[in-house]
Image (spheres, helix red, strand yellow):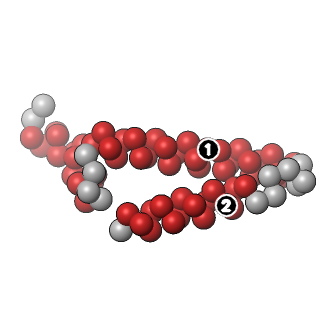
Amino acid sequence: MSTRLANFFTAHPATVGESYLGHLGFAAWFASRLFLAGGAALVHAFLPFFFETTASRIVRELHQRIDKRK
């Protein structure tokens, strides 16, 4: 792999102190939590007595995780 091409995969992860694979893992975990929050919010939209605070709690937790990375 050329250095220039490799830079596309490593430049951003390096700005947050991670390797490509470390960043991949965190981003995939983060996406799964967002997907879960979205599903809870969708169920809550139709059945408001379910998941009353789940989506907002997950979003707050994700926000805290991101703030810790700065």
Alpha-carbon neighbours of circle 1 within 10 Å: few (<14), some, or many (≥20)? few
Left or right side of 23 for 19: left
Which residue is drawn at the image coordinates 16% and 39% (left, top)? 5
Query: Horizontal and vertical percent for residue 66?
Result: 45, 62
Secondary structure of the residue carrying numbered label 1: helix
Q: Residue at x 70, y 56 (%)?
A: 55
Q: Is residue 7 above or below residue 16?
A: above
Q: Give the side of residue 9 with respect to residue 4, left or right.
A: right
Q: Which picture quadrant has residue 59?
A: bottom right
Circle 1 is placed at which residue position?
A: 35
The image shows residue 4, relative to residue 67, as above or below, that is above
- Which mark sits nearer the N-terminus, 2 or 1? 1
Specify the label residue 8 is tagged with: none
SS under mark 2: helix
Instruction: Give amino acid for label 1.
Output: Phe
Q: Quadrant of residue 3?
A: top left
Tag in front: 2 or 1: 2
Q: Residue 57, which numbered label? A: 2
Q: Amino acid at mark 2?
A: Arg
